[in-house]
Image (cartoon, rainbow, N blue to C red):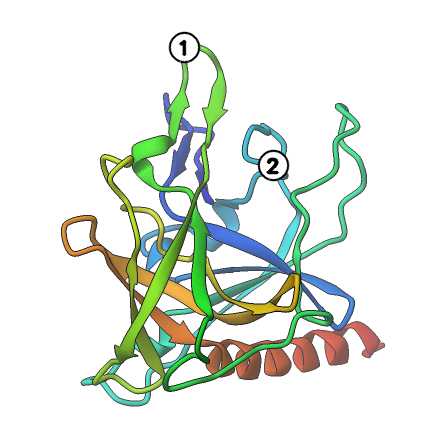
Amino acid sequence: MGEYDESDEYPYWFGGTCFLVRYLNKLYALTAKHVLKNMDPNAIRIPRRPDSRTFLTLTKLWTGKIDDPEDTDYADWAIVAAEEPGEDASGDPIVPPLDLDAITPVSFSRPPEGCKLAIRGYPIGLSRVSYDEQRLKWQAFAGSAMYVAPTSWKHCHTARFDDVSGIDNIDHMSGSPVVLVCPQGSKSVIYFAGLAVRGTKESGLVHFIDAKVIMTALMKVNSERTSQASSP
């Protein structure tokens, strides 16, 4: 996701990952709050697809509120309401949202035996804006990770990527979804585990907010959105 400034010679600036979710039949984009730092909320842009120059219509932004200045990471989330999109001129659909009405959120101090985490985002090492070619070039990285431990900060966890050797820089993975993948017979069951907020290639570590924080925020946001829609 990024920002658009029509007065600038280079109007698009992108820095960070977001992902679409469907919750109670409404569309939202989730990211880390610090990704939006210094952005004009009215200038935020989320491409319909990684290679698209057309964007979703966004209607309102909510961010986490800090109640303890010494412990802030759990509030590093942002939720953006989005209108249901029609087809654009190319006829291509948007990136499929993560369906939180169908995928169970999970909160844990240690994942069940045999389960692994998976994290998918758009690191700066694989993405760029080309003004000469008039293209937005985005390439996703999807990595498996082992759970490490809860952090000393409330409602947050640490995991370690299995392998990030193929990426020069994992910056801009903030805002990525974290899911738990558990084998079940010949299939795998996916659970929503949280929202990545920071990490480094050197350590291989990624820090993420627990899913229960994100789901609690979504419930409050959705209730407000529904109330506003039904108001005369």
Q: Name the residue located 29 percent from the left edge and 34 percent from the top edge.
A: 125
Are circles 2 and 1 on residues that touch, CB within 8 Å?
no
Quarter of the figure with residue 81: bottom right
Residue 190 vs 230, above or below: the answer is above
Give coordinates of residue 225: x percent, y percent: 70, 74
The disc labelled 1 sits on which kind of residue?
Asp
Q: Secondary structure at mark 2?
A: loop
- Nearest the viewer among 216 and 199 is 199
The residue at which mark 2 appears reads as 49
Q: Name the residue located 59 percent from the left edge and 29 percent from the top edge.
A: 52
Give coordinates of residue 43: x percent, y percent: 49, 45
Quarter of the figure with residue 128: top left
- Nearest the viewer among 120 and 224 is 120
Q: Secondary structure at mark 1?
A: loop
Q: Residue furthest left?
A: 202
- Nearest the viewer among 38 and 165 is 165
Give coordinates of residue 84: x percent, y percent: 76, 52
Q: Name the residue located 20 percent from the left edge and 48 percent from the top edge.
A: 201
Give coordinates of residue 114: x percent, y percent: 45, 71
Task: Tell which tag, 2 or 1, sits nearer the viewer.
Answer: 2
Q: Residue furthest front?
A: 185
The residue at which mark 1 appears reads as 132
Return the disc, 2 or 1, that comes first in the chain's sequence: 2
Image quadrant where one finds the C terminus: bottom right
Q: Residues within 10 Å of mark 1 (few under 14, many from 20)?
A: few
Q: Residue furthest top?
A: 132
